[in-house]
Image (tube, coloured by chain):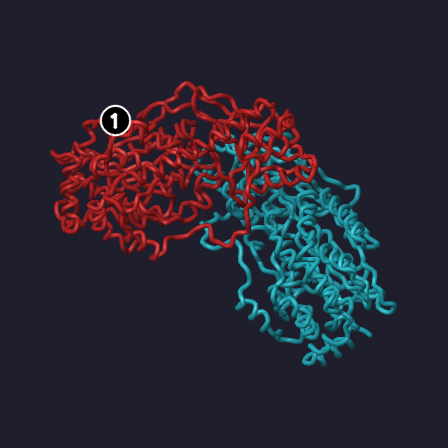
Chain colours: A cyan, B red
């Protein structure tokens, strides 16, 4: 059965879907109860989260921390009885990069330690710099020219928007109203993957444009002989946002050492310098590049299926293991990984005998463009550039992703797949009392289910309470273990375990949307 | 007229007080309009705040930063046309202390820069320390003993409560309800200064108890040969609270180097160490003690009175210039100083000819126990230990203080002085449209008006919107210029200028409460 036929079938049955969902599954209530009991009463999700965050540390793409996490998760999944735990290369990524030292302080007009971190993939300083600063305010290449001749041997300060006194809470949960709006959403055209891809492409384009401007800035500052750059992408209260300051490609051209700073510190330096008060900084960055192994990796492991006919089919669940570098990537996305790992641990502990094979994947290099999952999908299922389907394409029953922070699950994004939506509605019923109720046809973007969706596979991301993901933790230096509410992660673990169990027991794979056309321009 | 007689008079007239307040003043509406116009349309309060915070820097008691601020404010007040601008010693404080370097990072199990700062008055490390950690969880001396023999050459980690995901806004303004409750407050007994003093004494006692326990801890750690201490008093998101880690007395006994840390960083170290994972830190602190001048200072300056009879009387306004050391003390209390300085600038710019002399005081060493204002009051008005009144005691018409953060003024605490309350009600009327409406008889504590109240002088603190003072800025490393909303400071400046003007023009000094009894035990 190819995907078109399956969609046609499912589409035709959409109205009757609840009964379809109830029929044709060998999932039983006793096992669902066991899943809840194990996940809520003997949870190990916080222990897993501790190892992923504190013990493995920051897990930047191809860094030592990500390598530690790959090794540890492979070992841990094996210890829980999963099989074929593998650190599987997905393709070529680029250089590894680690921080060996970072120190920055204002030494004149008086001493003050500054809060900041090197931007990813930026080089070391030549020992300890002791330099004056110059403020550069430019948003275009043209605006930079006026600074020519003023930058030699200076530390350049780039502008940042001032944080404001905050009258809104950092964290929130979805209200019933908001969830009802999501549930009521109707796509204008028949479900298609296009909007999600467009969104992703737009994000990628913006990211590339920003990177291009920054590259031009760095080029000029390099040629003008500036010593280093201090910039800030925002944040407040000691929290700052992080990103990459140079390409990770092995053959990337040189850039200056650059730090991302807490806005309060950056703004103090800027105000002083603009008032004509000489500002001197002391700055030492020691970073280390690794170019021996440029490959990127995912960690995969399985609970083998037990049904003779169905065990060659796969239910996948996953989350990305990589993070940014200035914190331990707790909500982005140790939370998702800990929940997915806990889900398979629960299934093993509950003694589940799935009909289909369950495969967990912990993706690498998501932050740079979903590279781990896209590489995996290309290697196993299909390249969206050609849409030549590999044999496994037919075998994937569903992929479930978790990557919207540490908030509990409130439902699931059906990505315009109406037939799947009806099934999910049924599967959520046992979790109504735990706050997971909502199926929306909306697409959501920004993470690894898109890699599956892009080749016509049923990939889904759960709806999660936002908490302080958007305001405080996402890509910041404060994405730490404290931001993980244990009750939320426990709830998410049992919901995911149950969804995976249902998908593994159901007679049919999950209905699919139409296969998308090949996108030869798509950059993998 | 002594204070008893004045109070009896004012008390008897309390019901009729609004008319009393309206009568007997030479304050005129045109001048009040000029004050508003100058303060709202040609404000320099943010410029003043910038100099106090960014340019002077942290202003710990007897530090170089406070010395810079003393020099700058003296000069600035003079430049605005105030007379007799003086850096006036109030008595002996203790050692000066400044930070020359602070660097702390985790170097194993992986590298991570940590956010923290030396506790005030703690010593330097002996160069760069590279040491293992040990977690010490003890709240009593007895609990410490079990750690004997385990501390040598280690960096000790003290426990801290974990920050939680925040569902409440950092900042708030007072609601109408809250203000109405304040306005409706009736003291149980006739107004007296006792409750405020009791509150202050309790705070002081708690502070001393905490200091005593910490001293015992440091003693034991010192004698056991520990290398340094890392502790945390809380905070979140990169914000941490600061305090002193050693006495400022010149003859204080030695303590270990100690840093106050961001809880997220401290907790990561603790979790790792408690999981049995070897944690190594790199730590360098260079602090510098100044023992040549142990005196503390206030900055005072005047706008001379013009009424032949009344110009020997004084209306005072003040705020404390000192701060904690890990930030620039923006809301605690550059805000108050900037507003008070702006108030006298406005009065000069508006060409006010006050009948009484207006005297601004910027206090030193408030954070250690209101020392600057208490010393000043003792030198100029009375020692609360003896209550022998000095000649100036009779001359003080009123003292107005501002030290509850950067929020706009919503009214004033009348400190149980009912007669004054009625007058304030009248004086607030022109500011109803700017949110300043409420007079409460409540006492408020914790700052320098208490020094006046303690000797029976009419000292008052304004009610201010709390904003994020209690949650985010008060005594933290994030008490920075960004936390100062310009509109709030402008509003406060015109309210204060107007109150000072009214007090300077009124026929009679402000009514007083009964003189308190001498308190020989009171430690000055």
Quarter of the picture holding the C terminus of chain B: top left
Secondary structure of the residue carrying tag 1 is loop
Foreground of the two, B342 or B195: B195
Locate residue B406 relative to residue A335 in the image: left or right.
left
Quarter of the picture holding the N terminus of chain B: top left
The residue shown at (46%, 51%) is A166
Locate residue A276 relative to residue A103 in the image: left or right.
left
Q: Can you give x and y, in whole percent of width and height, for residue B361 in the image?
A: 29, 33
Foreground of the two, A351 or A119: A351
How crowded is the residue under tag 1: few (<14 C-alpha within 10 Å), some, or many (20+)?
some
Foreground of the two, A136 or A73: A73
- Is residue B85 visible in the rendered structure shown here? no
Residue B435 figure quarter: bottom left
Q: Taking A422 as reference, is A264 above or below it?
A: above
Q: Taking B308 as reference, is A487 above or below it?
A: below
Residue A195 figure quarter: bottom right
Q: Taking B402 as reference, is A374 above or below it?
A: below
The residue shown at (64%, 49%) is A330
Q: Can you give x and y, in whole percent of width and height, for residue B493 in the image?
A: 30, 44
Q: Taking A24 as reference, is A268 above or below it?
A: above
- Chain ID of residue with mark 1: B
Residue furthest out toward the front: B142
Locate residue B290 relative to residue A87 in the image: left or right.
left
- Is residue A403 visible in the rendered structure shown here? yes
**Mark 1, residue position:** B386
Q: Can you give x and y, in whole percent of width and height, for residue A402 in the image?
A: 67, 59
């Amino acid at each position: 059965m190819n995907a078109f036929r399956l969609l046609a079938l499912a589409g035709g049955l959409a109205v009757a879907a609840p009964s379809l969902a109830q029929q044709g599954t060998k999932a039983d209530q006793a096992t669902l109860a066991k899943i809840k009991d194990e996940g809520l009463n003997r949870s190990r999700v916080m222990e897993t989260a501790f190892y992923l965050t504190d013990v493995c540390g920051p897990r930047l793409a191809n860094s030592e921390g990500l390598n530690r996490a790959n090794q540890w998760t492979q070992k841990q999944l094996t210890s829980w009885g999963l099989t074929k735990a593998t650190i599987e290369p997905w393709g070529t990524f680029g250089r590894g990069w680690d921080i060996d030292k970072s120190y920055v302080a204002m030494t004149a007009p008086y001493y003050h330690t500054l809060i900041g971190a090197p931007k990813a993939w930026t080089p070391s300083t030549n020992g300890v710099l002791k330099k004056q600063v110059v403020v550069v305010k430019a948003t275009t290449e043209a605006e930079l020219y006026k600074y020519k001749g003023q930058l030699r041997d200076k530390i350049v300060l780039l502008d940042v928007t001032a944080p404001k006194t905050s009258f809104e809470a950092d964290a929130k949960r979805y209200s019933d109203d908001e969830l009802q709006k999501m549930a009521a959403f109707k796509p204008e055209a028949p479900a298609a993957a296009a909007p999600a891809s467009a969104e992703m492409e737009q994000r990628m384009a913006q990211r590339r444009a920003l990177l291009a401007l920054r590259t031009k800035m760095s080029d000029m500052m390099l040629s003008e002989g500036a010593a280093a750059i201090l910039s800030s992408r925002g944040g407040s209260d000691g929290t700052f946002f992080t990103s990459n300051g140079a390409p990770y490609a092995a053959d990337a051209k040189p850039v200056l050492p650059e730090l991302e700073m807490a806005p309060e510190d950056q703004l103090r330096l800027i105000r002083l310098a603009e008032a004509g008060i000489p500002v001197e900084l002391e700055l030492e960055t020691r970073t280390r590049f690794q170019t021996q192994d440029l490959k990127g990796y995912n960690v995969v492991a399985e609970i083998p299926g037990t049904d003779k006919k169905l065990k060659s089919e796969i239910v996948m669940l996953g989350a990305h293991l990589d993070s940014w570098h200035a914190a331990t990537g707790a909500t982005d996305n140790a939370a998702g990984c800990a929940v997915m790992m806990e889900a398979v641990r629960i299934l093993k502990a509950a003694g589940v005998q799935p009909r289909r094979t369950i495969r967990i994947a912990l993706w690498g290099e998501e932050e740079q463009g979903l590279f781990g999952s896209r590489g995996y999908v290309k290697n196993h299922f299909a390249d969206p550039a050609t849409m030549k389907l590999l044999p496994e394409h037919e075998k994937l029953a569903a992929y479930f992703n978790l990557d919207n922070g540490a908030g509990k699950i409130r439902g699931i994004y059906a990505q315009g797949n109406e037939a799947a939506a009806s099934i999910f509605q049924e599967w959520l019923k046992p979790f109504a009392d735990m706050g997971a109720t909502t199926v929306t046809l909306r697409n959501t973007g920004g993470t690894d289910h898109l890699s599956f969706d892009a080749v016509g596979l049923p990939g889904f991301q759960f709806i999660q309470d936002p908490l302080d993901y958007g305001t405080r933790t996402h890509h910041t230096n404060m994405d730490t273990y404290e931001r993980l509410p244990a009750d939320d992660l426990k709830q998410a673990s049992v919901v995911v375990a149950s969804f995976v169990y249902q998908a593994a027991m159901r007679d049919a794979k999950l209905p699919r949307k139409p296969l998308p056309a090949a996108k030869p321009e798509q950059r993998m």
